[in-house]
Image (spheres, rainbow, N blue to C red):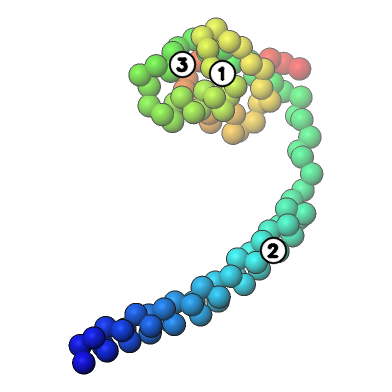
Amino acid sequence: MAEETKKKAPAKAAAKKAPAAKAAAPKKAEAKAAAPAKKAAKPAAKKASGQTVTVTQIGSPIGRQAYQRQTLIGLGLNKLHRTRTLEDTPAVRGMINRVSHLVKVEDSAA
């Protein structure tokens, strides 16, 4: 009898898992169908304000925390004394603030 119990238990478990997998598949399909609708609802790119900021890397990311290295990459800097001219937005200013000890900032009036 112990053998019969062992045989029945896996069959029940397999039967329970199969409907759950089928139920999850339509949810994924619905999520994919809804995603393009969200993309279409996004507004067009914002107009450039005309103000720029020039950022020069003066410090090495060697030995720094990972978020500081990633922030430098996000600013478009990867080697010492490289300079980038970026649009002056709150996002860029926040990134500069996080790595202010590694960069030199010059405001450019346009």
User: Disc 3 marks which amino acid?
Assistant: Leu
Q: Taking 77 as reference, is 53 left or right?
A: right
| Dot placed on the residue nearer the N-terminal end, 2 or 1 | 2
Q: Secondary structure at mark 1?
A: loop
Numbered mark located on residue 77 in the image? 1
| Dot placed on the residue nearer the N-terminal end, 3 or 2 | 2
Tell me: residue 54, above or below residue 87: above
Distance between the Cα atoms at labels 3 and 2? 42 Å
User: Disc 1 marks which amino acid?
Assistant: Leu
Q: Secondary structure at mark 3?
A: loop
Density class for disc 2 (Cα within 10 Å; few <14, some 14-19, many ≥20) is few
Density class for disc 3 (Cα within 10 Å; few <14, some 14-19, many ≥20) is some
User: Disc 2 marks which amino acid?
Assistant: Ala
Q: Quick one: quadrant of the C terminus?
A: top right
What is the count of numbered marks?
3
Distance between the Cα atoms at labels 2 and 1? 36 Å
Q: Residue furthest top?
A: 81
Q: Taking 8 as reference, is 90 left or right?
A: right
Question: Which residue does the numbered mark 2 point to in the structure image?
Answer: 34
Residue 71 in sight here: yes
Looking at the picture, how far across and down is residue 6, in whole percent?
26, 83
Numbered mark located on residue 102 in the image? 3
Residue 105 in sight here: no
Q: Nearer the viewer, residue 105 or 9?
A: 9
